[in-house]
Amino acid sequence: MEYMTGPVTSTQGNILCCQCGVAIPPNPANMCVGCLRAQVDITEGIPKQSTLHFCKQCQRYLQPPGTWIQCTLESRELLALCLKKIKASLSKVRLIDAGFIWTEPHSKRLKLKLTVQKEVINGAVLQQVFVVEYLVQSQMCEDCHRIEAKDFWKAVVQVRQKKKMCSHCHNNTFYGLDFYYSSKQQAQKMVDFLQCTVPSRSKSSQRLISHDIHSNVYNYKSTFSVEIVPICKDNVVCLSPKLAQSLGNMSQICVCIRVTSTVHLIDPRTLQIAEIDGNTYWRHPFNSLFHPKQLEEFIIMDINRVQEKKKVAGAGARSNKHTLAEAWVRKTSELDTDHQYFCCTHLGHILNPGDLVLGFDLANCNLNDEFANKMNPHEIPDVVLIKKSYDRTKRQRRRNWKLRELERDREGADTDDERQYQDFLEDLEEDEAIRKNVNIYRNADIPVESDTDDDGAPRISLAEMLEDLHISEDATGGEGANMMTE
C-alpha cells in the first residue's frame, strides 16, 4: 500500500446546464450564461431608441420640460441629458458604465453604449451590454423664436441723462441708451446696478401683451426708466442757497471733481468739499453752467499759495489733496492785450507760472441759471480753473499702455467721439480712484521711458499695468510641433 505524502488539494466539480447540458461551474440558476441570457432579458423595458431636440440657431439641447442647455458632442453634459431621457426605465437595473459610440456629426444620430447588471433567477447576477440610439430633431427654442419674430424682449431699461447744450439754451436734450432683456429679472438687476453706481432715480411700468383666460396667464412687457443726474466730472454748478447752507455754508459756485454713487463737489475758494447723493439732488436740483466744449485755455501769469484759512462756524470738511492758491491768468487768445483775470483755484499743488490751464470764463458770458441770476455779482468769480492742460499729441505718443476694446473703425470715427475717448484716457492717468477697477495692459510696441524725461504730465506706473497675454494656435510651439527632444 502506498501513501500520498503531498498535500491534499480539493477541486471544484462541474455541473451540467439544465438547458443545453454543457459542463459549467455551479451557479444558483444551474444554467450557462448563454441559456440564462436566452431565458432572461434584463434590458426589457428600456427603450433602445429615443429623441433629442436641438435648436440650430443657439446650438442648445432641450432638457424637459422647458430648459435649454448648451452641450458639446460627447460631453459629460450631453451624456447626463441622454441618461435622463431613460432614467425611469433604468431604475430596475444597476448602471455600471455608459459612453458614446462615435457617429458622424452630420448624421443626426447619437449612440450610447450602456452596461447594466440585474439579479435574476435564484440570486444570480447577470450583466449585459446594449446600445441606445438617439435621433436628434431640430426644434427652435422660445428665445430664438422671439428673435425671428422680432418680439424677443420682455423688458427694456431706458437710461437717460438730461443735459443743456449750452448756457444760453432753453431746451433740454436727453442722451441715453436702451437695454433690452428677455426677462424682467435681468432688467431689474441692471436697474439695481445703475442705482449703486451713479446717482439716479427710476420708474417702472408694464403693458399687457396677451392674456390666457383659461390658464390665467398674463404676458407683460416691462419698461424701466432710469434718469441719471445731469452732472459730470469737471462741471461748474450753481447750488441753491438752501442746499449750500445745508452743506456747511459753502459757496454756491462749485466744481464737480468726481461722480460715483454720489456727486463730489469742491469749493475753489475755500477747498470745502461735499457729497450729494441722488435723493438730495432730486430734492434740490441744480444744473451745470457750461458745456465741456466751452472750456477756454488760460496761461498762469502769477500764482501764490494761500495758507490755510480759518474755518467759519458750521463749515464742512476740506480737501487734503488740493492746495488753495490765488492766481492771475490771461487767455491764450488775448496774449496781445494786457487784460488779466484774478481767481482762486484749488489746483495750487500742480500749477506754476507759465503753465497752461483750462477753465471757464464767467465774466464774459451770459449765465442762464435760476440760482446764478439771483446771486450777488461780486460773489461770482471771473474765472473758474478746471484742470491743467498738457500737450495731447505728446501724451498720446508716450502712452505705453492700452485698454481692451471692441474692434472699431478709427478712420471713420467721429472726431467728437474720439475726443471724448481721449478725455477718458487722460482721466485714467490723472485720477487713481477712477482706474482702480479698470484693467490696464502694457503696450509692448512703445518703449518705457525714464522718469527724468517726464514733462510733468500724469502717467501710470508699470506696477499698475498687466502683461498682455497672447495665446498661439499650438501651446507646444507651433502647429504639429514635436515635444520630443533628441
Image (spheres, helix red, strand yellow):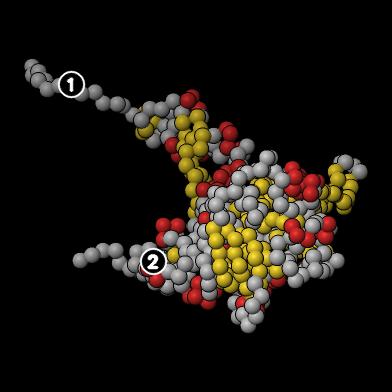
Please tell me the numbered disc located at residue 365: none
* Residue at the spot 57% in from the left edge and 32% down from the top edge: 92
* Amino acid residing under circle 1: Val
The spot of residue 345 in percent (x, y) is: 61, 60
In the image shown, does 137 or 3 lie closer to the viewer? 137
In the rendered view of the protein, which quadrant contains the C terminus? bottom left
The spot of residue 163 in percent (x, y) is: 77, 62
Q: Are marks 2 and 1 in contact (CB under 8 Å)?
A: no
In the picture, measured across the screen, residue 192 lies left or right of residue 82, that is: right
The spot of residue 238 in percent (x, y) is: 75, 56
* Amino acid residing under circle 2: Asp
* Residue at the spot 50% in from the left edge and 72% down from the top edge: 395
Residue at the left extreme of this rendering: 1
Up the image or down, 230 lies above or below 11; here it is: below
The spot of residue 319 in percent (x, y) is: 58, 49
Q: Which residue lies under the disc numbered 2?
A: 451
In the picture, measured across the screen, residue 83 lies left or right of residue 53, that is: left
Q: Which residue lies under the disc numbered 1?
A: 8
